[in-house]
Amino acid sequence: MPIQMVDLKTQHEKLQPELNQKILEVVENASYIKGKEVQDFENELAAYLNVKHVIACANGTDALQLAMMALDLKPGDEVITANFTYVATAEIIALLQLKPVLVDVDRDTFNINIEEIRAAITPKTKAIVPVHLFGQCAEMESLLALAKEFNLYVIEDTAQAISAQYTFSNGTKAMAGTMGDIGTTSFFPSKNLGCMGDGGAVFTNSDALAEKLRIIANHGQTKMYYHDFIGVNSRLDTIQAAVLRIKLRKLDEYCQSRAKAAKYYDEYFGNIKELIIPVRSKKSSHVFHQYVLKTNGIDRDALKEFLNKKDIPCNIYYPVPLNKQKAYWDNSRIFTNTDYLCDIVFALPMHTELNEDQQQYIVKEVIEFIKK
Ligand SMILES: *Cc1c(COP(=O)(O)O)cnc(C)c1O
């Protein structure tokens, strides 16, 4: 078996009979849009996350858009998010004519830095969008306190961290995406809970926001052909909901497989000074959407090339900070940690189907490069 960054094929084979049957059922019922499976999936995911409302939509980027539209933000309002993230987060802020205010992250957890958020707050700031990067929650307790102090909305981008659990200092636990006003996620195939195409969802504990989110996702329609808001068309297909219902039942097992693979890497790389293994936050579990190492004093790009030659895929998340992208150019401030991380991060294959032979080979080759 060739090693892959994400092995969806093997994962699929294990579920194939069940998936085939369900997909065929949806097809035969011709309930392609808003079929019963969609509502069932929303309810099951809400129960899993212990959140009051889940509203499915077309993808994770739309989920962010729905969230920001539901919060009545006005052009020019400032929205703070991390400079070290996937582009979708900042893209939606900019698309809605809000102002993305990018802030630096922590070197150890890769997540948004609370003091940097505080320093970036102005009278125009309306919301904070933490991204739970690579599978671990941002420091939500301090972030929520800050949001409360300045009366700011919190939208959690949970595309990479569904199922991660955060523990507050009083012992209360909450799932990623359920702590702020709205949580968003993506069911893109390679995400921890992925479907067979595009999919996404928003979560909220607010009845009023849930109602508004549903209306916005459906052309702003309050009743058939009456449009009280400007909305969008963003739906999860029934087939995708049927697939996700099956995969949701496997999600805990999938998280365990990822944790096991991470532990294997940790054991071999933990005492190699050229590699810094992913730091675990004290308050969040880690669902390892990605296993991201920091290289220390070695040529990262040469390592990548070396591994690729040995048929080991690897990737850089993310090579360029958002503030250095042409579309989001902002050199008004210095982002020391983001700059540092973009130069040294290095992601190894991480998925639910990695086996020990494959990991042994990966580890052996990484170590061989370092010892060269
Ligand atoms: C994948 C991802 C998204 C976007 O999800 P899509 O379903 O691809 O639109 C948004 N934010 C983050 C952090 C992501 O990783």
Image (tube, rainbow, N blue to C red):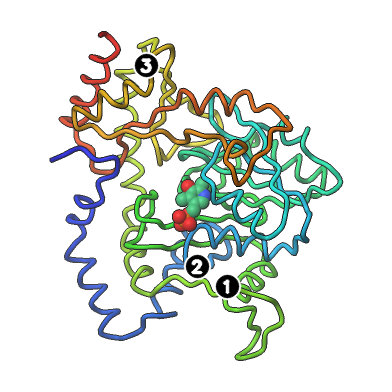
Dot 3: what SS? loop
Q: Is residue 159 visible?
A: no
Task: Say which residue label 1 marks.
Answer: 217
Label 1: how many Cα within 10 Å (few below 14, some 14–19, many 20+):
many
In this rendering, position of residue 120 left or right of residue 324: right
Quadrant of image for the N terminus: top left
Residue farthest toward the bottom in the current orientation of the protein:
225
| Residue name at image x 60 percent, y 91 percent | 224
Query: In this rendering, which labeled residue sits more in front, label 3 or label 2?
Result: 2
In percent of width and height, residue 315 lies at 36, 34
The amino acid pointed to by label 2 is Cys
| Residue name at image x 43 percent, y 11 percent | 297
Q: Are marks 2 and 1 in contact (CB under 8 Å)?
A: yes
In the rendered image, which quarter is residue 52 located in?
bottom right
Q: Is residue 143 visible?
A: yes
Question: Where is 220 relative to 71, above or below?
Answer: below
In this rendering, position of residue 89 left or right of residue 265: right
| Comes first in the chain, label 3 or label 1 | 1
In the rendered image, which quarter is residue 303 located in?
top left
In percent of width and height, residue 94 lies at 66, 54
Numbered circle sitting on residue 57: 2
Pick the front one: 351 or 60: 60
How far separated are the C-alphas under marks 3 and 1?
46 Å
Task: Say which residue label 3 marks.
Answer: 270
| Residue name at image x 46 percent, y 40 percent | 135
In percent of width and height, residue 31 lies at 36, 84
| Comes first in the chain, label 2 or label 1 | 2
